[in-house]
Image (cartoon, rainbow, N blue to C red):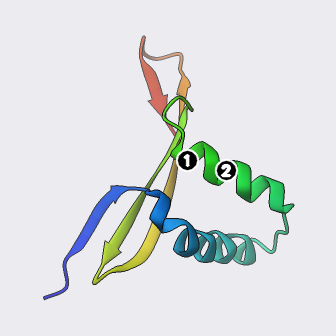
Amino acid sequence: MNVTVIRSIREADARDWRTLWQGYLDFYRTVLPEAVAATTWGRLLAPAEAVFGVIAAGDGLLAAVAHCVLHRGTWSLGDQCY
């Protein structure tokens, strides 16, 4: 039975995240400087950042990634997640 788990991104996910990141860029036919990827990865792991990531993993493989950005909104007192 294949079980998919949704969990926070971990440092050990770096290589697989890079593969998914590149697929995302390829889909949008976009090229970004290496510094953007490195900075994004660092932000995803930094607890003080308003950015975090989750992944879907199954059978030991990363299947999908979601980048989440917390920001102030106008409809609530708390942060919103985009």
Q: Is residue 10 left or right of residue 40?
A: left
* Viewer-closest of 57 and 11: 11
User: Spatial distance from mark 1 to mark 2, Cα to Cα?
Assistant: 6 Å
Q: Residue at x 72, y 48 (%)?
A: 39
* Viewer-closest of 47 and 54: 47
Residue indicated by mark 1: 44
Badge 1 vs badge 2, beta-carbon distance below 8 Å: yes
User: Dot 2: within a 10 Å radius of its alpha carbon, few (fewer than 14), some, or many (20 or more) residues?
Assistant: some
Q: Residue at x 74, y 77 (%)?
A: 26
Tell me the quarter of the image containing the N terminus: bottom left
Callout 1: SS: helix
Q: Is residue 51 above or below residue 64?
A: above
Q: What is the tally of numbered marks visible in this picture?
A: 2
* Viewer-closest of 12 and 66: 12
Instruction: Spot the residue most to the top.
Output: 77
Q: Is residue 10 above or below residue 52?
A: below
Q: Residue at x 69, y 74 (%)?
A: 22
Callout 2: SS: helix
Q: Give x and y (percent) for residue 43.
A: 61, 43
Task: Name the quadrant containing residue 59.
Answer: bottom left
Q: Is residue 54 above or below residue 73?
A: below
Q: Residue at x 82, y 62 (%)?
A: 34
User: Dot 1: within a 10 Å radius of its alpha carbon, few (fewer than 14), some, or many (20 or more) residues?
Assistant: many
> Could you tell me the amino acid type at mark 2?
Thr
Instruction: Spot the residue most to the front.
Output: 12
Q: Give x and y (percent) for residue 70.
A: 52, 32
> Could you tell me the amino acid type at mark 1?
Leu
